[in-house]
Amino acid sequence: MACSLDFIEFVSSQIATAGTVRCRKMFGGYIVYVDEKPVVLVCDDIPYIKEHEAIKSMMSSAERGFPFKGAKEHYILDVSKSDFAVNVVKALVEVLPYPKSRKKNK
């Protein structure tokens, strides 16, 4: 699941106009957040996005794959086409929830 930092920077730059982009290393891969929502999962230098009704028509011809063993199938986002990637990411940002807070109550 290892990823190169160069590829993470490339993904981030390709979708930069979709919103505020930040990355977080997780289990050898990365999660790319846009406007604080986890949108892209990058494993082995492959950007995956959740299959969602909001992007179904845009991603109808996209490749699919499993980011890691036991994961659900995801779309593979073609980030080489920046305008396309930005449109897909923006559509996902509109419909995906914010992550739940992991703060523990005392």
Image: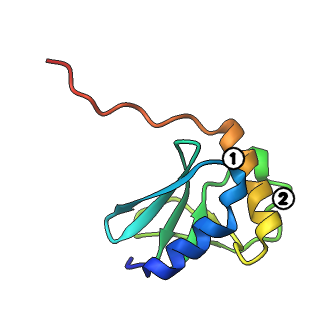
Q: What type is the residue that disc 2 sits on?
A: Met
Which secondary structure, mark 1?
A: helix
Question: Would you name the residue on which mark 2 appears?
Answer: 58
Q: Residue furthest right?
A: 57
Residue 56 seen in the figure: yes
Q: What type is the residue that disc 1 sits on?
A: Leu
84, 20: nearer the viewer: 20
- Residue 47 is left or right of residue 62, and the answer is left
Which secondary structure, mark 2?
A: loop
9, 59: nearer the viewer: 9
User: Horizontal and vertical percent for residue 21?
Assistant: 57, 54
Whether residue 50 is situated above or below residue 36 in the rendered picture: below
Q: Which quarter of the rendered picture does the N terminus lie within?
A: bottom left
- Residue 76 is left or right of residue 104, and the answer is right
Q: Residue furthest top?
A: 106
User: Horizontal and vertical percent for residue 40?
Assistant: 56, 59
User: Horizontal and vertical percent for residue 57?
Assistant: 86, 55
Question: Would you name the residue on which mark 1 appears?
Answer: 92
